[in-house]
Image (cartoon, rainbow, N blue to C red):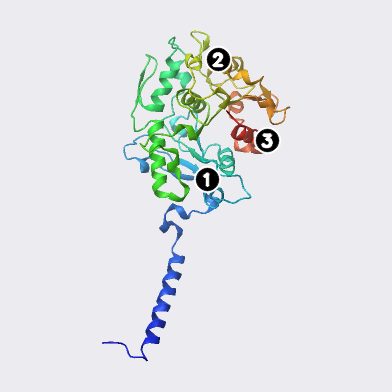
Amino acid sequence: MPFDKCEKPGKFKAMRNLWWLSVFILTMIPSGMHGQEQDLQQSALDGIPVLPSKTDPKIQIFDNPHYIFINRDIVISKNSSLPADRHQLLLFIPGTQPLAQQGKGKGPYKFLEEAANLGYHVIKLTYPNDVAAAEACNKDGNPQAFEKFRITLIMGGSFNNGFKIFTISRADSIENRLIKLLLHLKMTRPLEHWEQFLNDDGSIRWESIAVAGQSQGGGHAALIAIKHHVARVICSGAPKDYNHILNRPAEWYHEKSATPKDCFFAFNHDQDRTGSCTPKEQMRNLRALGLEQFGAPADVDTEKPPYHHTRILTTDYPGGKLKSVDAHETFLNPKNAGVFRIVWDYVLTEPVH
């Protein structure tokens, strides 16, 4: 039956009220019901956890969360008062952690926040990292031992040198964990465009990735850069692969590098002796890697940016005698952000090739 003239205004009014009610309800839905895209800017900068097993059910071990950091005002809002989106991922690979210490904290979160505020997408990656390279390889006379150890963790495989034996599945490797995390973020946070760090075939687009790491993670970062052309390499307390049987740096430092050497940056403490590698041996490693060609080491305690554009940076902060483990963690320790932020900015933004 058609509406008569006196009924139409009431019906239209009811429909209009229903429409406004719908809009009101939608605005009141909790942000989580819209997915992670609605996370507040502050939480995105504080670090958002993602369990590895949520990205790939085949990941069975070391399932403590990855963390992502991103400045959405840069990446999404394109705020012109802030640094531009670099369209680069900073992949941070942590150092060795005993099983009892796994999953405690977000690592060097102040450094990672700074990278996000400079326009990077940032990932702190969880991976099998309870065995130290020095523990596995220091008694091995094979000049390729350190490289084989690291490739096992990076790509997956088996390592057996008579001193240490273990197998890492492809699913649990650094490469697969990164790929699956990026695919997960593509689906759950589409406005941030994490997929730009993957090729069309699903492989890692290494040339758009700055690889950074602390200790063992710094060694992984450097070897990845030898094997793949990456955007930048930042090693802290690393790389420490020194063969004490042969009394020389590991063989892989001398391999032809896919990444130009001016993209490498290394920061080490004068009192850092972790990994059975003395500061003198550490300097031999950096020479073998070819970083001295860009200038003598810069003491950041006395020199200001741009540190004569060197790629080797050192400190003795805060001075006095330190335990080696404390010296080892000095550069990325969140407590030292006020001291080293200008150095972080240098290694994250100094122009390269």
Residue at the (43%, 14%) spot, across then down? 144
Q: Residue furthest right?
A: 302
Would you say the residues marked 1 and 2 are in contact, meaning their CB atoms lie under 8 Å apart? no
Q: Could you say where residue 136 lies in the image, as x and y percent from the top left?
A: 43, 18
Q: Could you say where residue 56 lies in the image, as x and y percent from the top left?
A: 34, 40
Is 262 positioned to the left or the right of 127 in the image?
Answer: right
Residue 195, located in which quarter of the rendered image? top left
Pick the front one: 323 or 13? 13
> Circle 3 sits on which residue?
339
Q: Earlier in the sequence, mark 1 or mark 2?
A: 1
Amino acid type indicated by mark 2 = Ala
Amino acid type indicated by mark 3 = Val
Q: Could you say where residue 203 lies in the image, as x and y percent from the top left?
A: 38, 34
Q: Earlier in the sequence, mark 3 or mark 1?
A: 1
> Circle 2 sits on which residue?
288
Q: Could you say where residue 65 lies in the image, as x and y percent from the top left?
A: 44, 41
Spatial distance from mark 3 to mark 1, Cα to Cα? 23 Å
Task: Please say if 214 is above or below 34.
Answer: above
Answer yes or no: is residue 144 visible.
yes
Would you say the residues marked 3 and 1 are in contact, meaning their CB atoms lie under 8 Å apart? no
> Circle 1 sits on which residue?
70
Spatial distance from mark 1 to mark 2, Cα to Cα? 35 Å
Residue 66, located in which quarter of the rendered image? top left
In what element is the residue under mark 2?
helix
In what element is the residue under mark 1?
loop
Question: Which tag is nearer the camera, tag 3 or tag 1?
Answer: 1
Amino acid type indicated by mark 1 = Ile
Pick the front one: 21 or 10? 10
